[in-house]
Image (cartoon, rainbow, N blue to C red):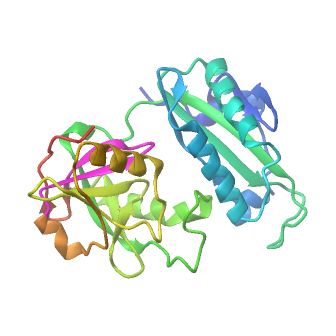
């Protein structure tokens, strides 16, 4: 069965302060967020009707907006409550929440000092991002690199950062892979297109790249905390692609990806081992 397009779904979306009919949430084509990527967002999982790490996600949303130079016209508490409210209105039990903030249509130029800031929060039922993830997904290595940290606000969920992720994932899918491993500007292992990455060595210890040019994911931090609570050593360090052959296991972490095993990266194969959570 074909999935319902997102503009054809039913229910409500929280839009600029109130729940609005899904089909009535409209913006003009000439808005700064669309043309100049003046847009930040979050992705949040709902489990049994509760949003996982909601406060941390909202804090990061505000951090991202601040880094892009605009002020969200609501408090963090207001956004937290609105996320919970729209989940209840939509009766989402196990799904996804997408808060998004963007500059409006008052100006159409590089400068956007007088644009209105808009906020929307949508939610829907959603299962696994990768299918079938328990068998382990396959990654290629992208030709695109994560940008140097002095070229873009790398520690945000800003929409412009994801353009090269789409390019990388499309390239991977054309080659028969599920996703793509991206390297950083110094050719170190960075992350997948929308998830952080961990490797397991022969001693059962974990290795993960230092997030100094890509997002330090909330799920990533949670996995590190869980590993340490189980006395599993975690090495946060620079990892070169030629080290991949030395690892026995690999998995991705992220709000969408959750914890997803990886069976291969290019010619490097991994055992789909028992995960730590």
Which residue is at 53% across, 60% downward?
162
Say whether residue 248 is magenta: yes
Please, is residue 266 above or below residue 74 in the view? below
Please, is residue 138 above or below residue 164 in the view? above
Whole-percent x and y of residue 47? 46, 26
Whole-percent x and y of residue 115? 87, 59
Magenta segment range?
Answer: 247-263
- The residue nearer to you, when weighing 236 against 178, is 236
Can you tell which quarter of the image residue 65 is in? Answer: bottom right
Which residue is at 57% across, 44% downward?
56
Which residue is at 73% across, 58% downward?
33
The quarter in which the N terminus is drawn is top left
Q: Is residue 123 left or right of residue 190?
A: right
Which residue is at 38% across, 82% downward?
186
Whole-percent x and y of residue 50? 53, 25
Can you tell which quarter of the image residue 119 is in? Answer: top right
- The residue nearer to you, when weighing 277 against 172, is 277
Q: Is residue 262 left or right of residue 40?
A: left
Please, is residue 228 above or below residue 65 in the view? above
- What is the number of callouts on the image? 0
- The residue nearer to you, when weighing 50 against 138, is 50
Say whether residue 199 is magenta: no
- The residue nearer to you, when weighing 201 against 259, is 201
Whole-percent x and y of residue 264? 18, 56
The quarter in which the C terminus is drawn is top left
Can you tell which quarter of the image residue 80 is in? Answer: top right
Considering the whole magenta stretch, tell me its main secondary structure: strand
């Amino acid at each position: 069965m074909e999935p319902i397009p997102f503009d054809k779904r039913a229910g409500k979306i929280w839009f600029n302060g109130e729940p609005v009919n899904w089909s009535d949430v409209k913006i003009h084509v000439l808005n700064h967020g669309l043309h100049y990527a003046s847009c930040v967002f979050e992705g949040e999982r709902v489990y049994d009707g509760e949003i996982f790490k909601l406060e941390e996600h909202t804090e990061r949303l505000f951090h991202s907006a601040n880094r892009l130079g605009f002020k969200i016209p609501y408090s963090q508490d207001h956004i937290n409550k609105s996320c919970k409210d729209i989940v209840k209105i939509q009766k989402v039990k196990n799904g996804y929440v997408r808060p998004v903030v963007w500059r409006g249509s008052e100006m159409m130029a590089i400068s956007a000092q007088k644009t209105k800031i808009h906020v929307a929060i949508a939610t829907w039922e959603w299962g696994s991002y990768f299918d079938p993830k328990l068998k382990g997904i396959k990654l290629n290595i992208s030709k695109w690199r994560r940008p140097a940290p002095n070229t873009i606000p790398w520690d945000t969920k800003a929409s412009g950062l994801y353009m090269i992720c789409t390019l990388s994932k499309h390239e991977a899918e054309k080659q028969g892979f599920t996703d793509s491993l991206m390297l950083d500007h110094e050719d170190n292992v960075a992350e997948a297109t929308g998830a952080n990455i961990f490797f397991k060595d022969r001693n059962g210890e974990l290795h993960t790249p230092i997030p100094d040019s890509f997002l330090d994911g909330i799920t990533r931090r949670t996995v590190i905390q869980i590993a340490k609570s189980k006395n599993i050593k975690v090495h946060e360090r620079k990892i070169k692609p030629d080290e991949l052959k030395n690892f026995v296991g690999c998995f991705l972490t992220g709000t969408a990806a959750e914890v997803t095993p990886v069976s291969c990266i290019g010619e490097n194969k991994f055992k789909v081992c028992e995960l730590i959570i």
